[in-house]
Image (cartoon, grey):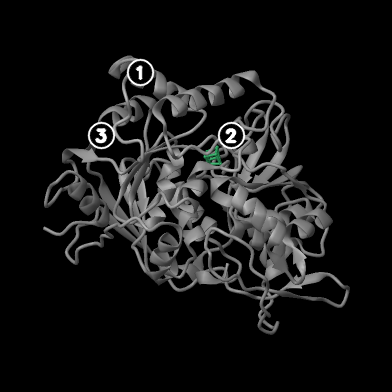
Amino acid sequence: MGMTMTEKVLAGHAGRKSAVPGDNIWVDVDILMTHDVCGPGTIGIFRKQFGPTARVWDREKVIIIPDHYIFTNDQHAHRNIDVLRAFVKEQDLPYYYDVGTDKYKGVCHIALPEEGHTRPGEVLFGTDSHTCTAGAFGEFATGIGNTDAALIMGIGKLWVKVPETMRFEFEGPLPPYLMAKDLILHIIGDIGVDGATYRAMEFAGDGVMSLSIEERMTLCNMVIEAGGKNGIIPVDAVTEAFVKSKTAKPYQPVADDRDARFHSRRRYKTADIQPTVAKPHSPDNRGTARECKGTRLDRAYIGSCTGGKLNDFMAAAKILKGRQVKADTYIVPATTEVAKGLATTRLDGQTLAEIFQQAGAKISQGASCAACLGGPSDTFGRLNKSEVCISTTNRNFPGRMGSKTAQVYLASPYTVAASAIRGEITDPREFLYQPELPRPHGLEDGPGLSGLALHGGGLRDQGGNHRPARVPVSGASL
Ligand code: SF4
């Protein structure tokens, strides 16, 4: 019987010719990632179970990326980093991206591909639920707890039940006002926050394959919000070009067999999907930006592993350029590489950072998770009272971004930027959708996750306001 991509990766890493959903198998691990929140706990369990002098199973395969509680005066947060440093020194681990050094990266799920640690056909576990982001590279990637991670540290294997695969196909390239965030919020609205519990979510169709690698990451990033075990996307030239630009390590891509069996198949026409939001307090509380029009906002937040990549900021800049925000707007680059991109990538002659500053947004001086997870009370962008926020992040449960009395709407960078300008939830088509405009001219390219050319541009209307041109969001263009 044929296998899905997920089944094939897991079977191969168990030394088997085949595997079917429900099989329990020992899987060899290619990469184990941990960070400042779960790393200390994992290290403690590893020492307790394997002994104080134990060594990790493979020092080339353990990646430690501090990213969550970084730019804070909180002493507990600093203590976590101290524990990581001591462990890295003791184990002589080569892949540690320490705070306060040139190696510091920022958010782990974006740092991993930037540093060449995400490769097709591999198995990646991380002590963070959004480790599923790496499924965009055609690998099996999922979040685990500290105990599982400590076991992997010791033996390089994990006992895994093979999940069934749900397939989601999108037909047609994305309309110019949509982003991958709209697609995944739409799916989660359809199936609910438990709709994919312990199942692989495979994304396919020409709509998905026309997306840039960053946008594919956004899709896979949020499968955990539907309870998914992992997200996965077929490997194509876009994937291979990106991976080969980051690493020379060999890898073995897999593809679905023609007779692969899926738990279910859902097909969507991208043209039918509207700019989508998740209303408080759950990612499946779906609405459209139009339905929520007029909802007053105190804050707009653009950042995180979901919405803090260079393409996300380029999308926001297309709307914010030449305009002023009414809502308090926070910009948080996911990684130091994205931060460099804000300073060097230009749209109509201005850097993205200049565009955000002129629009009145506040830009974080450090790349990190920042307020996506709330964090200590001095965290940049944290919601400390009963504010209403629209955010490019991935969760909007009570207290997720700080105060339990705050309300968070999730949306794409386009919708967040449009809403920031109006101070209320706004459909980005009010700023973006101008099919009568001529094709845009090119713009300069800064460093980015995609390593692919960015194109875009804009015009000014009769009132002198910048009017972004109609440019495709999908494909290699954003
Ligand atoms: S940016 Fe947010 S969702 Fe992503 S790893 Fe950090 S806290 Fe988690």
Which quarter of the rendered image does ligand 1 occupy? top right
* Residue at left offset 24%, top offset 37%: 160
> Label 1's element?
helix
* Position above or below: 326 against 56: below
N-terminal-most mark, 1 or 3: 1
Q: Amino acid at mark 1?
A: Arg
For the N terminus, the quadrant is: bottom left
Q: Amino acid at mark 3?
A: Leu
N-terminal-most mark, 2 or 3: 3
Nearest to viewer (mark 2 / mark 3): 3
> Disc 2 designates what residue?
373
Q: Give the image quarter of residue 150.
A: top left
Nearest the viewer among 159 and 194 is 159
On the question of residue 174 being in view, the answer is no
- In the picture, measured across the screen, residue 342 lies left or right of residue 16, that is right
- In the picture, measured across the screen, residue 7 lies left or right of residue 235, that is left
For the C terminus, the quadrant is: bottom right
- Mark 2 and ligand 1: say if the CB distance to the nearest ligand atom is below 8 Å: yes
Category of crowding for the residue at label 3, using alpha-carbon neighbours closer than 10 angstroms: few (below 14), some (14–19), many (at least 20): some
> Disc 1 designates what residue?
47
Q: Are marks 1 and 3 in contact (CB under 8 Å)?
A: no
Residue 36: % across, % down: 52, 29
> Label 3's element?
strand
